[in-house]
Image (tube, rainbow, N blue to C red):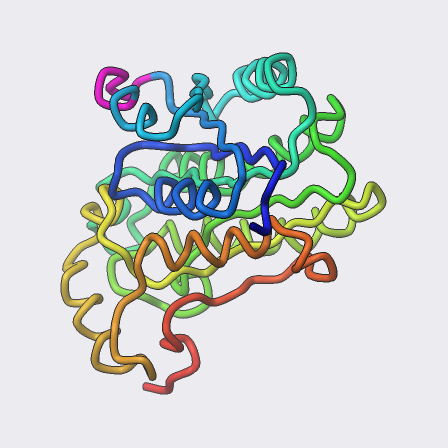
Amino acid sequence: MILQGKKILIMGIRNKWSIAWGVAQAVTSQGGEVIFTHHPMENMEKLYALIEEIPGAKTYPCDAESDESIEQALKQVKQDYGKIDGILHCIAHANTEDLRNDFIKTSRQGFSHASDVSAYSLVATARIAKEEEILNENASMVALTYFGSEKVMEGYNVMGVAKAALEASIRYLAKDLGTDGIRINAISAGPIKTLSAKGIKDFGSILDIVETRAPLKRNVTQVEIGNVATFLFSDLSSSITGEIIHADNGFSITGA
């Protein structure tokens, strides 16, 4: 088991359809111990019922728009678990109207909100984790992104811009974290039916296009993304940092 003895914090758990849950399953299958954070407004009855499927797992409230909330959550994790070996950033949000309308109609507030929650929260998490010495040496951070950061994807709009900022941030963070032996990478996952994906206009047609054009002729699953994340958390990926790894059945390599 490639994560035996490692403790992985998964930030942004929501429900059993989320990529975060797929990563949690993959991590535990490889011997890792998972810890979660959730948005304070989540339905806690449903969330507790979900995480109870992983014996001993805990979740902590964390508002990604607040440095104080991030710091409090990370300090509590360190107090309860000691230093940890990995962090999954699975946090993103944009206003519905900014996904449904043309990108040119994005409001200043909507642009700021999407960038803050989806990109800056990773920077804040990395900074606080470093300052508070929460990560073990040789630890690994992983974030989630999507092909809409590179090419125009109908309906992705301001989230594509926010994810582009996230990807650029990862390269700069890799430089700053590398002095402490900490790695950071992102997974550019193919489209998956999550609760968040429902906000994207005509999302079902995106899934159909991937099945037609991707070299492997199918869409990816939560567990497949979880397996890639597990690899990035493990010592098997010790030479990889600052990278955006596509896990989309090859869709990103195809032409129009």
Q: Is residue 71 above or below residue 232?
A: above
Instruction: Tell me if 243 is positioned left or right of 192 in this view.
Output: right
Q: Is residue 67 above or below residue 241?
A: above
Most foreground residue, 176 or 107: 176
User: Count the marks: how many?
Assistant: 0
Q: Please say whether residue 204 is one of the residues in the magenta stretch.
A: no
Q: Residue at x 27, y 68 (%)?
A: 219
Q: Residue at x 21, y 46 (%)?
A: 199
**Residue 67, quarter of picture:** top right
Instruction: Tell me if 144 is positioned left or right of 79 in this view.
Output: left
From the top left corner, tell me how far across and down residue 175 is, in percent.
Answer: 77, 51
Q: Is residue 216 above or below residue 184?
A: below
Q: Residue at x 28, y 23 (%)?
A: 47
Region rendered in magenta: 41-47
From the top left corner, tell me how far across and down residue 224 is, in percent.
Answer: 38, 59
Q: Residue at x 66, y 59 (%)?
A: 236
- Residue lying at the far front in this picture: please name it: 1
Instruction: Tell me if 188 is positioned left or right of 158 in this view.
Output: right
Most foreground residue, 87 or 56: 56
- Residue lying at the far bottom in this picture: please name it: 255
Quadrant position of the C terminus in the picture = bottom left
Q: Please say whether residue 42 is one of the residues in the magenta stretch.
A: yes
- Residue lying at the far right in this picture: please name it: 179
From the top left corner, tell me how far across and down residue 79 is, in percent.
Answer: 64, 12
